[in-house]
Image (cartoon, helix red, strand yellow):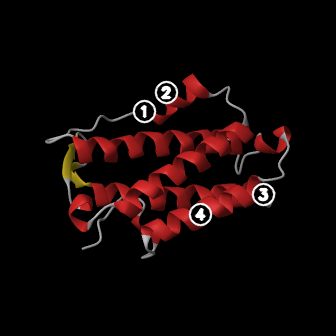
């Protein structure tokens, strides 16, 4: 059974690990030649800049990758919630190129871990205060859909 996450519609039935790889490759290609000024563009007034989106994506790769690792290694693991806006305030000085590099490196590391997991590993359960009982597979699907969701914003910025 395919887990239902807030980003299931974005994933649209794609295999999550392939989607993560393809999306990361697309993000890398989009921002490859950008100047610092281009990273400061946004897709709509009042929304995060491309740089902030990349910081957010890197933070998410780190946070959700850690959740998966904790669930795999800690019986009865309970994940902590986090406030993405408060995290952004703390790390908002990171440059766009550095944020893209951090995202792509963390994504590569997470995909290597996820690819090596067995079906039993992916079925390992943990709890979350907002979402309840989840599995490592849910994290994988969540991360893939989340990347795709934000890819659309970066594509919109690139086309402005």
Find residue 78 and report its horizontal and vertical position in percent.
21, 38
Q: CA distance from mark 3 to mark 4?
A: 15 Å
* Element class at badge 4: helix
126 vs 14: above or below: above
Q: Which quarter of the image is occupied by the C terminus?
A: bottom right
Q: Residues within 10 Å of mark 3 (few under 14, many from 20)?
A: some
Q: CA distance from mark 2 to mark 4?
A: 26 Å
Q: Are marks 2 and 4 in contact (CB under 8 Å)?
A: no
Q: Are marks 2 and 1 in contact (CB under 8 Å)?
A: yes
Residue drawn at x 40%, y 66% as measured from the top left: 8
**Mark closer to the chain start, 2 or 4:** 4
- Horizontal side, residue 132 vs residue 43: left or right: left
Q: Are marks 1 and 3 in contact (CB under 8 Å)?
A: no
- Horizontal side, residue 103 vs residue 96: left or right: left
Q: Residue furthest top?
A: 90
Nearest-to-viewer mark from 4 and 1: 4
Q: Residues within 10 Å of mark 4 (few under 14, many from 20)?
A: some
**Mark closer to the chain start, 3 or 4:** 4
**Which one is nearer the viewer's eye here, 44 or 63?**
63
Residue bearing mark 1? 83
**Mark closer to the chain start, 4 or 1:** 4
Give me the disc on residue 158: 3
Find residue 9 and report its horizontal and vertical position in percent.
44, 69
Residue drawn at x 75%, y 53% as measured from the top left: 31
Residue bearing mark 2? 86
145 vs 32: above or below: below
* Element class at badge 2: helix
């Amino acid at each position: 059974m395919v887990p239902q996450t807030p980003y299931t519609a974005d994933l649209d039935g794609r295999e999550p690990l392939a989607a993560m790889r393809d999306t990361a490759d697309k993000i890398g290609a989009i921002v490859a030649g950008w100047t610092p000024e281009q990273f400061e563009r946004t897709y709509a007034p009042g929304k995060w800049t491309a740089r902030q989106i990349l910081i957010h994506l890197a933070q998410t790769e780190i946070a959700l990758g850690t959740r998966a690792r904790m669930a795999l290694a800690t019986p009865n693991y309970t994940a902590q919630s986090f406030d993405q806006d408060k995290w952004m305030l703390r790390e908002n000085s990171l440059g766009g190129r550095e944020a893209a590099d951090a995202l792509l490196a963390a994504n590569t590391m997470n995909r290597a871990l996820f690819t090596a997991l067995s079906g039993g590993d992916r079925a390992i359960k943990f709890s979350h205060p907002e979402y309840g009982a989840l599995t490592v597979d849910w994290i994988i699907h969540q991360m893939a859909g989340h990347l795709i969701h934000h890819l659309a914003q970066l594509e919109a910025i690139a086309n402005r």
